[in-house]
Structure formats: C-alpha cells, structure tokens
C-alpha cells in the first residue's frame, strides 16, 4: 500500500508552490523524529526503515496518478507542473538513518532525508506512516517482553483486533522484531518468515455435545505397526483413573468436552494442546486433558499442554501444575510434570507485570488487543521537519516550546561509559569534529533551560549510516533480514541501563547538543524574535 499517492493533498499543493517559484531543485534536508518516548517510558525502538527504502526505490508517478491529481488540484495548477511530476523520482535522495531495531530517544533524528526540496517534501507523509506505527508497536512488544521476563514465550495473536489487514500484518512483523517469539498470523508467517503458533478455540470444544457424535474414534499407535485402537474407549478408561487420582467425581466432567479433546488428539496426536476453560477448568477441562494425554502416552505419543483464557490465570496455573505433578508421579510419566501452560484473555502490559509478580506456572502468553492496538498510546507522534535549505539552517520557533526545531544538518553520536553502557546521545553540526573518547566534552542538555555539563565518554559511536543514495542502497550497505533486525533490537535494548528501561517512572536518558549547535540555535531564536 506504500504507493506514491499515499500522501496528503497539501504535499502536492506545496510541491506546485516550490515549482512555480523556481525553488523545486534547491537542496533541502528534513529530519524524522519523535518528541516524547511512548507509553510514558524512557526509550523507543526504531522500525520501518526497510519499508521506507523499498518505498523510495519505487517512488514515481504514473500517467493514471497524474490524471487523478489533475482532477483534485485547483484548475490554476499548470499542465507543465503535471508533466514535471511524471519525471519525479528519488534518484537524487539520500537517506541516513540509525540501524533498524536500534534504541532511540526523543528529539534526535531517526532518519535524515536530503534531496531536491520538492521531492523530499512529497516523501513526508509516507515516511511518517511507515515509521510511526512500526516503531510504536515494536516498542510496545519490547515492553511486553520486559514485563514478562525472558523465560516465557510470547505469541502475538491480535490480527482479528488490528486496524485493518495492513495493520494486522505490520503488527505481526514488528511485534516479532520487538521481542515476541511467534504469531498466530499465517500470512505474516509466510511473508516474513515469522514462526507461527496456535491452539484451539472454545468453538471447537463446544461444537461436540456427546461422544456419540464422533465419526472417527480410532488412532494408530505411534510406531504405526500395531492395529488401530479405539481411542475413545481408551481415553474413557484413562479418565476413570485420572478422576480417582485427583479425587474428582467423574460425573462432573463434561462428556462433550472429552469427545472434543479426543477428536482433536486423533487429528494431532503429537501436537495436542487444548483450551481447558470452556466449562469448569479444574473439575472438567484439566481432568479430561490428563485423560487424553495419558491415553496418548500409552500409544507412544506426547501431549503438549493446555491453554487458559479466563479466571485468575496465575492461581489456576499453579493449581494445574500441581495436578500435572500428581499425575506424573502416580502414572510414572515424568513428561506430565513439564506440560506447557499457556494463557490469554486480554493480556495487557499491566496484567502481564502483575502475573510476573505473582507465583505462577505460566510458560506461554498470548497477547492480542493491547499489543496491536497500542491501547495505552495510539500514536508515536513522529514528525518530519525541515532543518536546512541550500546548506542554510532552517528553524521553526513555535508558540509551544516543545514544537521548536533544532536547525542545521546534524550528526548524532552515542557516548558510552566505562561499563559499555550508553549514557548520552550528542547532536553536533555536520561540519563539527566528532567528540573523542576519554576527553572532556561540553554539552547542553535538551530541555527548557539547556543545562550544561562536562562529560568524558569512554567510547563514541556515530549512530547514523547511509541506507539510500542515488536511488539505490549503497554497495557497502545492506538491508538486514527480519531475524537480524530482531537480534539487533535485543542487543541494543540489553545495552541500555535498567534505569532507562523501567516500565514505570524510568530515569530519562540524556540527549544533548554541542556548544556550537547551541549557539546556532540561540542566534536563530534571537534573530526570529527581532523580525
């Protein structure tokens, strides 16, 4: 969907204005950044670069595009301008960016876009569209991962709640990059190579009311050499044993649920993982599961586990684990104690954090609505601001100080301490020498007062690289695979101090400017106020 007309109408109005005044070829530079870290946190993960580069590679207008524009733009727009648009592409555009998956912070440029003024103006809306949601949902996924800890598997399962098909695919892709382990989205798995996962819905269980409805009730043993066994009868026999061990009245178990479990186990004897809260979890769902799992074991198969979608997930998971352990000991089957316990049910960052704080036996968490819709913050709020035209710095002085821009073409350096932890991102003017390791640097911290400080970095790294130049990806650069980006995101986040990753009240990470850049900003402010 990232086509050249996927933009706002006023971009073409401005483009005509540039062209009409003869300014369309002037070299300009825009910066894409956000003003505040999302979700009240201390960081953001940058995603969407690959899709931005793909968009730039194909950026152009067809005759059909031009015909449509002629129908919606004012009649005063000249035909020569429309003919000119047919020649427009991104062959003179250069994009430098932080690597995709990097930890980034407010007000520093994530991407710098340089090229003819008319062209780079036309790119604004689409680039923002491709970065805003990707970075937001990827950061949301990273926060869910931090809340869950490293020991639990996280499954993204929000397609049905996503904002349209494209939103669903983007959520699956960038949630995986942000730290989730798999997705329920089959198309995302095919397109992006993401591991896919899923279990069974309650509808499958409730679709069968009685064992008499089963049309297939036999199963061959795993060795395939013995005769088929009446699996329903075997499971019913196992259920009597399980109920005796668990001291559960067999009459309390739901026969339709047992039949549904049997039906699914016959179809997937090596992948038997069932939802157990369609009726009563402890009086029916778990005993029925254990009966089927025991029957599968007797035929040489191995069940996987259960899923909970309601109730007190932490407490139920502990109770279910104890049942598995009792059955493991009673039936002398060690694997029973290790069955996976998966949970879902409108999981949010807050509920996941509470779950992690309680005693629980959860192995897998499925997250949907609160992940893909980013309910805590629906937009990242990235902006795309002009900072330079014809090598002359540009500045926006707003009534709202937060919206004031930082002028000039800049380089961003990440400064690390002696422990290898980043502690400061420093913006310099493009022509300034870089800060040096183990030497004092005077900085002006971004904020209302621009507080000054002297820092001594142990290591200095320029965080921008050129990813697009002269219409193509440079030969010495490449766009990494989704798994490489995912690994980079994990390393980048791991390098950040815990105080900046706290989900509540994190310590703000420092972004600052050099003395020279601060002087430029101060002088432009003074000049603007005098005009």
Image (cartoon, rainbow, N blue to C red):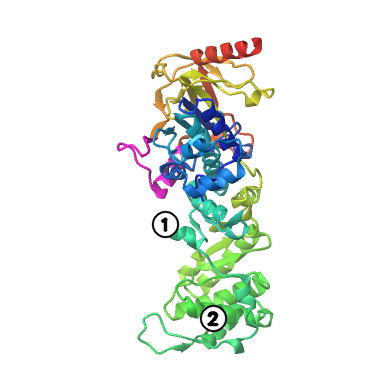
**Residue 140 at x, y percent in the picture:** 57, 45
Classify residue 127 as left or right of residue 381. Answer: left
Secondary element at image label 1: loop
User: Split into 4 quadrants, where in the image is the C terminus?
Assistant: top right
Q: Which residue is mark 2?
A: 263
Mark 1 residue crowding within 10 angstroms, few (<14) / some (14–19) / many (20+): some
Residue ID for mark 1: 193
At horizontal 41% and vertical 17% (from top left) the residue drawn is: 431
How far across and how far down the image is residue 19, in percent? 51, 30
Query: What is the crowding at mark 2: few (fewer than 14 residues within 10 Å), some, or many (at least 20)?
Result: many
Quote the CA–CA distance across marks 2 and 1.
30 Å
Q: Residue at x 67, y 80 (%)?
A: 249
Up the image or down, 384 lies above or below 304; here it is above
Residue 402 drawn above or below residue 485: above
Q: Is residue 334 visible?
A: yes
Q: Residue 322: x, y in percent?
A: 58, 65
Question: Hey, which quadrant is residue 114 in on the image?
Answer: top left
Residue 401 at x, y percent in the picture: 66, 22
Residue at 40% x, 19% y: name it.
434
Residue 214: in magenta span: no
- Please give the count of numbered marks on the rendered protein: 2
As rendered, which of 202 and 312 lies closer to the eye? 202
Left of 312 or right of it: where is 191?
A: left
Q: Nearer the viewer, residue 297 or 492?
A: 492
At x 30%, y 36%, the residue is 476
**Mark 2 element type:** helix
Region rendered in magenta: 468-494
Of 505 and 411, the residue lying toward us: 411
Residue 195 visible to an observer of this rendering: no
């Amino acid at each position: 969907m990232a086509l050249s007309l996927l933009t706002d109408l006023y971009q073409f109005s401005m483009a005509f204005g540039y062209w009409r005044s003869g300014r369309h070829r002037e070299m300009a530079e825009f910066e894409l950044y956000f003003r505040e870290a999302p979700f009240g946190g201390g960081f953001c993960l940058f995603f969407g670069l690959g899709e931005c580069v793909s968009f730039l590679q194909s950026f152009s207008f067809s005759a059909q595009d031009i015909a449509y524009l002629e129908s919606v733009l004012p009649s005063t727009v000249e035909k020569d301008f429309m003919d000119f648009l047919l020649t427009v592409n991104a062959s003179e555009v250069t994009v430098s960016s932080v690597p995709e998956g990097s930890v980034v912070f407010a007000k520093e440029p994530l991407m710098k876009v340089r090229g003819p003024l008319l062209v780079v103006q036309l790119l604004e809306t689409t680039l923002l569209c491709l970065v805003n949601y990707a970075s937001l949902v990827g950061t949301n996924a990273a926060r869910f991962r931090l809340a869950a800890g490293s020991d639990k598997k996280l499954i993204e399962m929000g397609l049905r709640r996503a904002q349209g098909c494209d939103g669903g695919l983007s959520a699956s892709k960038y949630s995986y990059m942000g730290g989730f382990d798999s997705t329920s989205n089959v198309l995302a798995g095919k397109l992006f190579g993401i591991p896919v996962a899923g279990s069974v819905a309650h509808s499958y269980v409730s679709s069968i009311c009685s064992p008499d409805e089963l049309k297939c009730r036999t199963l061959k043993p795993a060795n395939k050499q013995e005769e088929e066994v009446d699996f329903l009868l075997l499971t019913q026999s196992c259920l009597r044993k399980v109920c005796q061990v668990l001291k559960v009245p067999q009459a309390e178990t739901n026969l339709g649920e047992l039949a549904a479990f049997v039906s699914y186990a016959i179809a997937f004897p090596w992948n038997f993982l069932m939802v157990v809260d369609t009726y009563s979890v402890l009086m029916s769902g778990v005993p029925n599961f254990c009966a089927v799992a025991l029957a599968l074991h007797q035929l040489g198969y191995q069940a996987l586990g259960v899923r909970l979608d309601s109730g007190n997930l932490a407490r139920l998971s502990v109770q279910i684990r104890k049942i598995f352990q009792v059955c493991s000991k009673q039936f002398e089957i060690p694997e029973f104690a290790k069955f996976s316990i998966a949970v879902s049910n409108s999981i949010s960052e807050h509920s996941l954090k509470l779950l992690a704080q309680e005693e629980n036996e959860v192995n897998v968490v499925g997250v949907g609505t609160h992940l893909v819709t980013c309910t805590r913050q629906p937009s990242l709020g990235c902006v795309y601001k002009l900072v330079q035209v014809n090598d002359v710095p540009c500045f926006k002085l707003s009534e709202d100080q937060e919206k004031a821009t930082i002028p000039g073409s800049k380089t961003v350096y990440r400064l690390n301490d002696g422990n290898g932890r980043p502690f400061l991102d420093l913006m310099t003017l493009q022509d300034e020498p870089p800060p040096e390791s183990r030497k004092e640097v005077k900085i002006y911290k971004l904020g209302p007062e621009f507080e000054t400080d002297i820092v001594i970095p142990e290591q200095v790294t320029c965080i921008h690289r050129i990813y697009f130049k002269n219409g193509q990806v440079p030969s010495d650069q490449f766009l990494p695979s989704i798994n490489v980006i995912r690994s980079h995101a994990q390393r980048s986040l791991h390098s950040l101090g815990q105080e900046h990753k706290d989900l509540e009240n994190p310590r703000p990470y420092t972004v600052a400017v050099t003395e020279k850049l601060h002087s430029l900003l101060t002088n432009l402010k003074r000049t603007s106020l005098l005009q």
